[in-house]
Every structure is written in C-alpha cells, then in structure tokens.
Image (cartoon, rainbow, N blue to C red):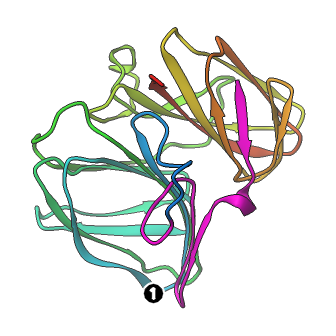
Amino acid sequence: MITVTPYDQLGKFRNEWLNATHHFSFGSYHNPQRMGFGPLVVWNDDTIAPGQGFDLHGHRDMEIITVVRTGAVSHQDHLGNKGRTAAGDVQVMSAGTGILHAEYNFEKTPTTLFQIWLRPEARGMSPHWETKSFPGNKKTGFVPLASGRPGDAGSGALPIHCDAAILGINLRAGSTVQHALAPGRAAYVVADGGSITINGIDASSQDGIEVKNETQIDITASQDTRIVLVDLAFTE
C-alpha cells in the first residue's frame, strides 16, 4: 500500500529565520493522524536563514539524522564535538543519555535539510556525534547513509541504534531504481527536487510517501531528483 501526503498538507512552522515543514506531529503542529511511522517519529524539512540557527538545547534517547540538501550546518555540543556538514553530507547524533548541542547556518545563503528522528532500540546508551561526506552517487542503487541494520555493517553508513536504514540516490530523469522490502519492513520515501512515480503512483518533490505491505518499490524519476528512503522494521 502506497500513501502519498502532499507537501502542502504537511505541518508548517514559520518565523523570521526558519521555514519548517513537519511530516509528523512536532512542536506546535499536532495531527493525531500523523504521530509517526513505526520508529520514525520526526521528518522535518527545514530552511534556515544565513547566520541563524538553533541555540544550545538538549535531547536524549533519540537517533537524529541530518541530511543536508543545500548550504551547510555547523554543529557544536557539550561533549566537545564540532563540525560542518555540507550539502550532500550527513550527520548522525545519537542522543543516548543526553546531549546538549547547537546547530547554525554560518553560510551566506540559506541552508536546506531534512532532519530525521528515529526511536532507538534501547534507552540510556552513550551519546555520539559523527558526520560524513557522501560524494555524488555513481551507483545504480541506493547508498546506505546511516544504518543500524546488521547487513549494512561495513557499508560505510554512519551507525545508528535502530533497526532502520536511511538510504539515498541521485536519480536522473527517466531512470528507475528498485528497492526490496523484507517481510515485516516498511519504507518512508521523499523525493527532493523533482516528481516521481512509485509503484505507478505519482508523487511530487517533498511529498511524504508511506509504503507498507509491499515486497518491492519501483521508483521512476520524471525529473532529476534525489531520493531519501528510510527502510524500517514496522508493525501496525
């Protein structure tokens, strides 16, 4: 079953420096029909103005993955970690027992990113932060960006404490990519930059796409686009 929620029907938050779209209930946006998708509890589509960002704040017991689309985000936390994650790169913050951090756009242009939160498989783990560059994908299939699936060990994906994988691919117009879903697994898919068809169903850029009870996903790009897909263990 494929369910597409159009971008303009997702939750919105706007202030003088942040333009945010919430795929699931978050902050002041509450929709009892959109409380998450399995362990996936947050998917925020953020545009951050130059010189602005999120002041020091805390998280715990959450796997937070940031996929930077344009610009860059700079991270600093109370553990002494510092780093800049640029467009095409990914950072992972395993909040564990607790982490205080700040995220800023120190660039001269807006930064756009997807921030994805997953519930960890266990509470109280040690906090961790890491960033990694993922050069343009020259492969024909999805590249694991962050993963806690045993099968992705050694793949180069950033580690997370959840039975899920964040996968990415840059798909040319007219090209098709396939992804198999094992029994008991589902997927959440977002196209970034162009429209697609997914198992024959049309979706536009930045729509939220839930995939359940399917054994294979066939995605065809109508325009050049990047696909971000979360493959996760799922129970109703």
Q: Residue at x 16, y 60 (%)?
A: 99
| Residue depicted at 13% across the width and 56% down the height | 98
Was residue 89 drawn as part of the magenta stretch in this picture? no
> On screen, 57 above or below 155?
below
Residue 53 in picture, x, y percent from top left: 40, 79
What residue is drawn where x is 46% and y is 26%?
Answer: 232
Instruction: Kindly indicate the quadrant of the structure image that contains residue 123.
Output: top left
Give yes or no for residue 16 being in the magenta stretch: yes
Front-most of residues 185 and 197: 185
What residue is at 24 percent from the left and 30 percent from the top? 121
Mark 1 residue element = loop
Q: Residues within 10 Å of mark 1 (few under 14, many from 20)?
A: some
| 55 sits to left or right of 31 | left
Q: Position of residue 230 (x, y in %)?
A: 52, 34
Farthest front residue in view: 32
- In the rendered image, the vertical position of residue 227 relative to residue 28, given as above or below: above
Instruction: Kindly identify which residue carries mark 1.
Output: 51
Quadrant hosting residue 179: top right
For residue 11, side relative to residue 99 (left or right) = right
Mark count: 1
Q: Amino acid at mark 1?
A: Gly
Answer above or below: position of 175 versus 135. above
Would residue 194 be found to the left or right of residue 143 on screen?
right
Task: Locate the N terminus by quadrant.
Answer: top right
> Residue 44: x and y, percent?
51, 59
Q: Which residues are magenta?
A: 1-29
Residue 163: x and y in percent read 35, 25
Work out whether 109 lies above or below 175: below
Instruction: Single out the residue that lies furthest toward the bottom.
Output: 16
Q: Quadrant of residue 63?
A: top left
